[in-house]
Amino acid sequence: MARNSPVRSSNTRLDAPKGLRTSVLPTRNRAARASRDRFGRSTEAIARGMGTPWFLVILTVFVLIWIGFNTYGPENYRFDSAAIGFTALTLILSLQASYAAPLILLAQNRQDDRDRVQIEQDRQRAERNLADTEYLAREVVALRLAMQDMASRDFIRAELRSLLEELSADDDAKKPAGSA
C-alpha cells in the first residue's frame, strides 16, 4: 500500500474518538475489551478502597507502628533511621501516592463513561416521553373535536320537544272536530 494512500487499515475505526477506537476483528477485540474491563474494574475497586475511612485508619496505624518501631525498637532491628528522616517510609508513601493518583483518574474516567451512557439513555427516554405526550395531546384534541360534533343533551331535548309538538299537532289535526 502506498504511503499516502487514502485506504485505512481495517483494524481502526474512524467514527469513534481516538481513545475509543477499537479493532474490527471480533475475537481479538472482545478479548482485549474484556481484559480492559477487568483491569478497569480492579482499578475502581482499589480506588474505592482508598477512599474509605478504613484505608486511612490502617495507613495511619501502619505509619505509627513504622515510626514507633524504628524510633523505640531494638537498635539492631531498626531498618529505617529517624536520624535521616525515615527515608524508606517516605519512599513507600510516595510510591503509594504515585500509584493512587492514576488509579483514581482511571476510576473517574470509567465513571464519566458510565455517566455519559446514562445521560444518553435519559435523553432517549425523554424523547420517547415527549413523543408519547404529543401523541396523547393530539388524541385528546381529536376527541374534543369529535365531542363537539356530537349532539348535546340540551340539543336532543329541544329536538324531542319539537318532535313531540309536531306529533301532538298532527294528532290534533287528525282527530275529528266533534270527538274532543
Image: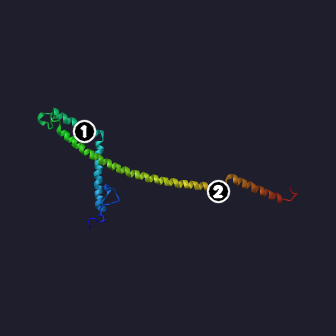
The quadrant where residue 145 appears: bottom right
Q: How many marks?
A: 2
Tag 2, which secondary structure? helix
Asked if disc 1 and disc 2 are in contact, CB closer than 8 Å, the reply is no
- The picture places residue 175, in percent across and down from the top left corner, at 84, 59
Query: Which quarter shows the N terminus?
Result: bottom left
Identity of the residue drawn at 30% across and 47% down: 105
Q: Is residue 106 above or below residue 5?
A: above
Q: Is residue 106 above or below residue 57?
A: below
Q: Which residue, given by chain and number where applicable, does mark 2 sit on?
A: 149
Identity of the residue drawn at 31% across and 48% down: 107
| Residue neighbourhood size for the residue with mark 1, other residues' Cα within 10 Å, grouped as few (<14), some (14–19), many (≥20) | some
Q: Amino acid at mark 1?
A: Leu
Q: Amino acid at mark 2?
A: Asp
Q: Which of the pair 109/53 is nearer the observer?
A: 109
Q: Which mark is residue 59?
A: 1
Left or right position of 91 against 105: left
Whether residue 108 is visible here, answered yes or no, is yes
Q: Is residue 81 above or below residue 173?
A: above
Identity of the residue drawn at 70% across and 54% down: 155
Identity of the residue drawn at 31% across and 55% down: 19
Q: CA distance from mark 1 to mark 2?
A: 80 Å
